């Protein structure tokens, strides 16, 4: 019991979790202050721990490490605390207890996952993240969000089931529960079944291609603040897990490359700008997955750190516009720069950063990934990443601010965003510029200090390469708009690959259900017919009028007794 208590006290995620449950009973007007206080206490606890392993616990003869702080987990833990604080400030005054609970409980689970030193602890927090996050999808309280939340929960639970199966398989093979390198292949190059199961579990949460639709299905349906929180933690927990368990896995290079490409085309034609940013999540995670495949863990961790801040800033700016206008549709926005100039300016900072403009956070982190592709001499992957980077500028760097604040005049003249929203966005913008100009504090957090020591983001080559890319991407956007080839924003619902699950998949499921029912009825008919025939035969023999119920003469019975006795004597003699 003492060991369990010590393990709980050692974990910053437990502080956040307890704080989340206290919110359920705390007066609503104190929620913001309490959440900031708890976040600060958790951050202080993380700082006082330092690098090392804590919270050792023995379970069924196995030693568990509930808290492990090393270079990789620390950088994720630090940015998670920054994100929690920004979300709390942004949603200041929110009175919904369920959302307030999830605002702390969901990040707490993600934090617990990145700090987990063993697979059992990881599984616990993995499932907690799924359960707590779904409350943000359900928060609007409509039937549409309820159904979306159920689909979201099903996908997340499936990931958890695969994770648990992987844990069992790994323990059966290694008799070890440590959460470290797993690998997809063994020494002979053959795929390990246990590794494949874990790979799929992490891949679902990372939104691998064809497994990505839960992001677009659930995040835009949440509330304004809920979508921001959801955009941060689930996929980044999965990225961390891939970086921990599958660094240098060659398959991730190609999976990540596809992830960087396909969302661009969906984002360009999408009318709902929150959904555009959800496609941007798929695209951005793709860069991180490619980096993990190259073994460039600094690139994956650094870009995850940056993406949480600058993509969060874009979600916050769009959320502020939605808060004032009631919509996030490109066809219903535009012209807001007249009355929301501060929000517009902060949004542009986020757009420049996600586009990796020099002097921003995106520039000093994305270069680590592009460099890794160049050093691996994988020309086509390098080319894909450059094309995807240009696509990021088109759909997130230009489309979001352009159609929200400029484009056509929607006629809406809303007030500037509320002060808490401006403060949160302002802090995020300062981080985007500050770290972009002076990245040394971020580089000091990188997990591989030897690799980062020789990296200089503002070399002439990096500057020229990125400026050329941005220049041509902006020029392409301008030309496409002028010649009217750029996809027009129209009220529509665009079909994604989830169409195959929802239409043919539903029809196939219906056919399988009908075929199963018909097969069962046929088999049951055959079985019941045979049983009925058997019962009739038994009744014929043993029933009141059956053969076994007849009266037999005593002499006949004596004859058969003598015959049987003779047979027994013969068998006894032969034996």
Image (spheres, rainbow, N blue to C red):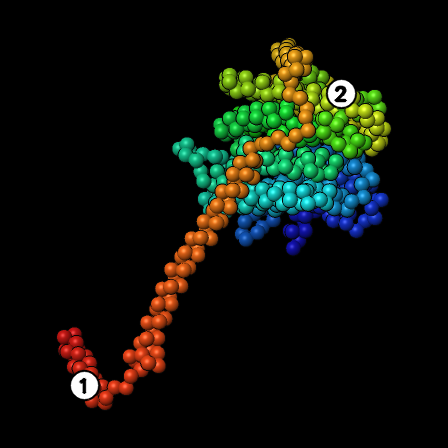
Q: Position of residue 358 (x, y in %)?
A: 69, 16
Rendered image quadrant of residue 316: top right
Look at the picture and state if 5 lies above or below 453: below
Question: At numbered mark 1, what does the secondary structure look like: helix, strand or loop?
Answer: helix
Residue to which mark 2 is pinned: 408
Kindly give the residue lying farthest to the bottom in the view shown.
554
Quick one: label 1, few (<14), some, or many (20+) residues within 10 Å?
A: few
Q: Is residue 529 left or right of residue 451?
A: left
Question: At numbered mark 2, what does the secondary structure look like: helix, strand or loop?
Answer: loop
Q: Residue at x 17, y 79 (%)?
A: 567
Front one among 324 and 59: 324
Visible residue check, residue 11 = no
Mark 2 or mark 1, earlier in chain? 2
Residue to which mark 1 is pinned: 559
Q: Position of residue 552 (x, y in %)?
A: 25, 86
Q: Which quadrant of the rendered structure holds the N terminus? A: bottom right
Q: Which quadrant of the rendered structure holds the C terminus? A: bottom left
Front one among 71 and 214: 214
Q: Residue at x 35, y 78 (%)?
A: 543
Rendered image quadrant of residue 453: top right
Residue 249: mark in rendering:
none
* Label 2 – label 1 distance at C-alpha: 111 Å
Visible residue check, residue 522 = yes
Q: Residue at x 69, y 20 (%)?
A: 398
Rendered image quadrant of residue 179: top right
């Amino acid at each position: 019991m003492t060991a369990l208590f010590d393990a709980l006290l050692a974990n910053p995620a437990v502080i956040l979790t307890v704080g989340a449950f206290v919110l359920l009973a705390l007066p609503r007007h104190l929620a913001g202050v309490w959440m900031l206080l708890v976040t600060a206490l958790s951050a202080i606890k993380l700082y006082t721990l330092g690098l090392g392993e804590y919270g050792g616990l023995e379970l069924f003869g196995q030693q568990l490490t509930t808290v492990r702080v090393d270079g990789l987990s620390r950088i994720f833990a630090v940015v998670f605390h920054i994100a929690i604080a920004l979300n709390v400030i942004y949603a200041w005054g929110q009175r919904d207890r369920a959302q307030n609970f999830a605002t702390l409980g969901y990040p707490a689970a993600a934090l617990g996952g990145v700090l987990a030193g063993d697979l059992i602890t990881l599984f616990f927090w993995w499932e907690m993240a799924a359960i707590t996050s779904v409350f943000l999808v359900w928060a609007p309280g409509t039937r549409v969000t309820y159904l979306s939340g159920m689909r979201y929960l099903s996908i997340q639970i499936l990931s958890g089931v695969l994770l648990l199966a992987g844990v069992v398989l790994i323990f059966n093979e290694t008799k070890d529960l440590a959460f470290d390198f797993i690998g997809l292949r063994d020494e002979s190059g053959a795929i390990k079944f246990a590794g494949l199961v874990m790979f799929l579990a992490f891949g679902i949460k990372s939104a691998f291609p064809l497994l990505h639709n839960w992001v677009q299905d659930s995040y835009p349906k949440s509330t304004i603040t809920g979508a921001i929180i959801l955009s941060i933690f689930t996929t980044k927990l999965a990225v961390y897990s891939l970086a921990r368990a599958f660094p240098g896995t060659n398959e991730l290079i190609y999976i990540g490359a596809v992830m960087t490409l396909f969302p661009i085309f969906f984002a360009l034609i999408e009318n709902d700008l929150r959904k555009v940013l959800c496609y941007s999540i798929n695209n951005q995670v793709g860069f991180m997955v490619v980096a993990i495949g190259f073994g460039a863990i600094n690139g994956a961790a650094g870009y995850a750190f940056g993406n949480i801040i600058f993509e969060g800033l874009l979600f916050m700016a769009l959320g502020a516009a939605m808060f004032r206008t009631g919509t996030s549709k490109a066809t219903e926005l535009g012209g807001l720069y007249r009355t929301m100039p501060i929000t517009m300016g902060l949004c542009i900072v986020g757009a420049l950063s996600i586009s990796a403009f020099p002097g921003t956070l995106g520039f000093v982190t994305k270069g680590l990934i592009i460099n890794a592709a160049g050093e691996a001499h994988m020309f086509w992957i390098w080319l894909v990443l450059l094309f995807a980077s240009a696509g990021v500028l088109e759909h997130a760097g230009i489309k979001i601010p352009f159609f929200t604040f400029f484009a056509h005049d929607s006629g809406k003249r809303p007030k500037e965003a509320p002060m808490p929203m401006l403060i949160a966005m302002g802090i995020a913008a300062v981080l985007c510029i500050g770290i972009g100009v002076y990245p040394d504090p971020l580089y000091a957090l990188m997990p591989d200090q030897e690799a980062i020591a020789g990296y200089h983001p503002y070399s002439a080559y990096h500057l020229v390469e990125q400026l050329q890319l941005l220049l041509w991407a902006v020029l392409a956007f301008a030309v496409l708009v002028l010649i009217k080839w750029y996809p027009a924003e129209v009220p529509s619902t665009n079909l994604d690959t989830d169409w195959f699950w929802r239409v043919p998949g539903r029809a196939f499921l219906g056919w399988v259900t009908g075929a199963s029912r018909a097969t069962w009825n046929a088999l049951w008919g055959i079985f019941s017919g045979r049983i009925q025939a058997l019962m009739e035969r038994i009744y014929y023999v043993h029933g009141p009028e059956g053969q076994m119920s007849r009266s037999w003469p005593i002499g006949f019975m004596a004859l058969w007794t003598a015959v049987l006795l003779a047979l027994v004597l013969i068998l006894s003699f032969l034996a």
